Image (cartoon, rainbow, N blue to C red):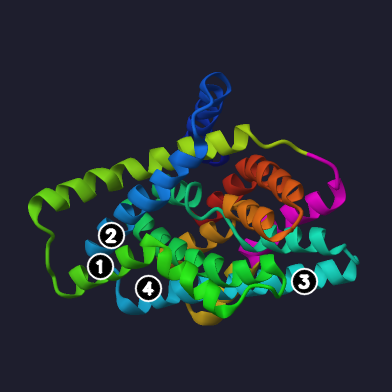
Amino acid sequence: MSSFLSIAANIVAPVFIIAGLSALVDRHFRPDACALSGIAVYLLTPSLVLDNIAHSTLEVGEVWQIVALAFLNSLLMVVLGIGICRLLSFERDLATGFILAVALLNTGNYGLPISDFAFGKEGLQRAVIFFLASSVWTNTVGIYVASRGTGTARQAVLNVLKAPLIYAMVAGFILNITNTALPLPLERAVSLLSQATVPFMLVVLGLQLSRTSLTGRLAPLGLAVFVMLVIGPLLTIGLAALLGVSGLARQVSVLQAAMPTGVMSSVLATLFGGDARFVAATILLSTLASMATLTVLLAYLM
């Protein structure tokens, strides 16, 4: 029991303390969440990615193992989501929202801090790789699923090319492979921005949660939360055994696969006609429920 309490207090609780305080600030000051999200997406997260990859000591084989786990887990979750929607005869907008909710996880502004608190800098390096693979998935398959056939491969590729994460990733790999350092002023700037990313992401998470509420469709809502928080990590544990992934790469990948619904799923549902209210409710409920599920999972992984 002490292990559970220690994990809950020292790893999971700090995330919710910061997010909760941010939610209180949001109630009183109503900061522009869209502008803050833009800072996170276009400035801080690319800096985190560039800094971590440039200084990463990961072997190429381990990187590809993490990428494979991220893609295969997302693929299986999409297939599972489609199967559940067809079996239960969900209407089109609910089906789209359900698939987005279970397949697009919050591996960024929730997964990265949890991985950092649980496994330190080495864990964060691996979590960044999983996050990058998830981001590519979100901007390709996620858009296709959201549009239900109206999105094109060209549009998906263009969205990927617009994302600064991709360029930060490429630059980080070039610096790492060539053993090259950025000019000192730029390196220090990137390092400072990288260090600010995790707490800033938690602030944005708190703002987003404070503006979300639970609505109807309780049965599909509960099912979606169960699928992503329980079935998702179990699938990844099986995939890791199948692919021979072990050690910290396995621990971080399983943890990332157990994250709640990502905010991007709500954005895509809104843009392309899914049930955005259902997705928003799933984000809130899955995030709250993850306090318990992640505590249990971390006790198993650690």
Please give the name of the residue rendered at 86% of the width and 48% of the height, measured from the top-left corner: 217
Give the CA distance from mark 1 to mark 2.
7 Å
Q: Tell me if label 1 and label 2 are in contact, CB under 8 Å.
A: yes
In the image, taking residue 277 as reference, residue 176 lies left or right, namely left
Dividing the picture into quadrants, the one containing residue 87 is: bottom right
In the image shown, does 279 or 126 lie closer to the viewer? 279
Of badges 1 and 3, the one in the foreground is 1
Of badges 2 and 4, the one in the foreground is 2
User: Where's residue 159, x and y in %?
Assistant: 49, 67
The residue pinned by badge 1 equals 171
Please give the name of the residue rendered at 67% of the width and 41% of the height, measured from the top-left corner: 284
SS category of the residue bearing label 3: helix
Judge whether residue 5 can be spotted in this image.
Answer: no
Q: Amino acid at mark 1?
A: Ala
Query: Which badge, 4 or 1, comes first in the chain's sequence?
Result: 4
In the image shown, does 42 or 8 lie closer to the viewer? 42
Q: Amino acid at mark 2?
A: Leu
The residue pinned by badge 2 equals 50
Give the CA distance from mark 1 to mark 3.
37 Å
Query: Which badge, 3 or 4, comes first in the chain's sequence?
Result: 4
Taking the magenta stretch, the answer to whether it contains residue 11 is no
Query: What segment is highlighted magenta in the picture?
Result: 215-234
Give the CA distance from mark 4 to mark 1.
16 Å
Neighbour class for label 4 at 10 Å: few (<14), some, many (≥20)? some
The residue pinned by badge 4 equals 63
Give the CA distance from mark 3 to mark 4.
29 Å
Query: Which badge, 3 or 2, comes first in the chain's sequence?
Result: 2
The residue pinned by badge 3 equals 82
Dividing the picture into quadrants, the one containing residue 84 is: bottom right
SS category of the residue bearing label 2: helix
